[in-house]
Amino acid sequence: MSSHPRVHEKSILVVDDTIENLIVMEEILAPLYRVHIATSGPLAIKNALSAAPPDLILLDVMMPDMDGYEVCRILKSHEKTQQIPIIFVTAKSGVDEETLVFSLGAADFIRKPASPPVVLARVKTHLAINDQRKLLEDQVEVRTSQLRIQALELDENRLEVIRQLGRAAEYRDNETGMHIQRMSRYTQLLSLRSGMGSSEADTMQYAAMMHDVGKVGIPDCILLKPDKLTVEEFEQMKTHTVMGYGIIGKQKSQLLQLGALGALTHHEKWNGCGYPKGLSGQDIPLIGRLIALADVFDALTSARPYKKAWSVEEALSLIQREIGEHFDPELARLFLELRVFLEEIMEAFRDG
């Protein structure tokens, strides 16, 4: 074999069971490329799957035991080697032969006896094409990564706006800031228990954060009144549901749509005695039924200027009594099963 200096970056694997053909190919290629040889199909596959695979393969068709077609099929089936350009070197001719070569995923073919200028031109062309493919893939990967980071940042910014929107009502309602954290997590927990996937349950959690945003439109004399509200005052307090729906508005975002529905319907009751529309049963949107349980439980177990905090036992007993009255029976029973997890959330997000 020739002893041309192998100083070039690109490597070519030449596969042929005839030594004379290998010598000819190496003489043509060695001045420009690092040349490796394989005298059989199995050796070619071993070389291609090695830690340093070739940049291009020149593959003979007619070889004993395993012909070039089978070698090509195997290499194109492996993720590691499927992108390596393969150029068949064949004495066969005809439309059927050409069709088969390209159907196997080969990049090109060269007729025997191979002309040095043709070999060099085809090799150079397909190496350049492969380099452009790799460059494009790298650019796509980089851009995809950038877009993924931007999307995550956008999602986080959007969720932070939603959190702050929820907290706006808390600050006016003498809340400590933990009510939204707790009740939204109760909503997420109940969503998961009801069979939702993690992504859908997360959406329910974030939608729940907006449930009381309409309270920003309730006068302080009513919202902050330490005593029982009059009938007229309570009627005005009820309007926070409709105002919340209006503040969020009609949006394309599924999350904001759910947030608006949650704000509007979280005071509806299973028996139809809630507000603002007196919806009953499953006519109440799911997000409203989920929030109703989470919101009432947190309100009962939280201390306020006008009341002491109820124990978990007392709060769950009330929910038990209100199954089929205030609360969706199926969701309420699931909620009662979550006591240990509810207490963990209470401990993690304590007031003060």
Image (cartoon, helix red, strand yellow):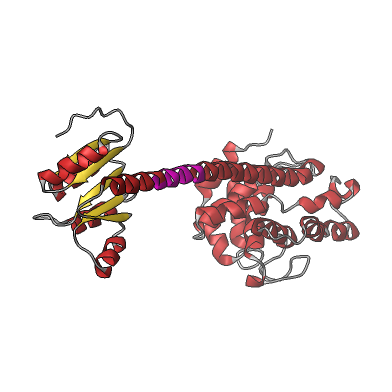
| Residue 125 position in % (x across, y down) | 38, 47
Q: Residue at x 86, y 52 (%)?
A: 217
Q: What residue sits 76% from the left and 56% below the top?
A: 248
Q: 52 or 22, which lies in front?
A: 22
Q: Which residues are magenta?
A: 129-140
Q: Position of residue 319 (x, y in %)?
A: 61, 58
Residue 10 at x, y = what percent?
32, 36
Count of numbered labels shown in the rendering:
0
Q: Quadrant of residue 104?
A: bottom left
Q: Tell whether 226 sits left or right of 142.
A: right
Task: State left or right for residue 226 relative to residue 336.
Answer: right
Instruction: Report whether 74 appears left or right of 191.
Output: left
Who's the residue at 61% across and 61% down the image?
A: 321
* Residue placed most toward the observer, 89 or 146: 89
Q: If the image is split into quadrants, where does the N terminus sit?
A: top left
Is residue 17 at all visible to an observer of this figure? yes
Q: Which residue shows up at 58% across the image and 60% down it? A: 320
Observer-nearest residue: 324 or 123?
123
Name the quarter where the C terminus is drawn: top right
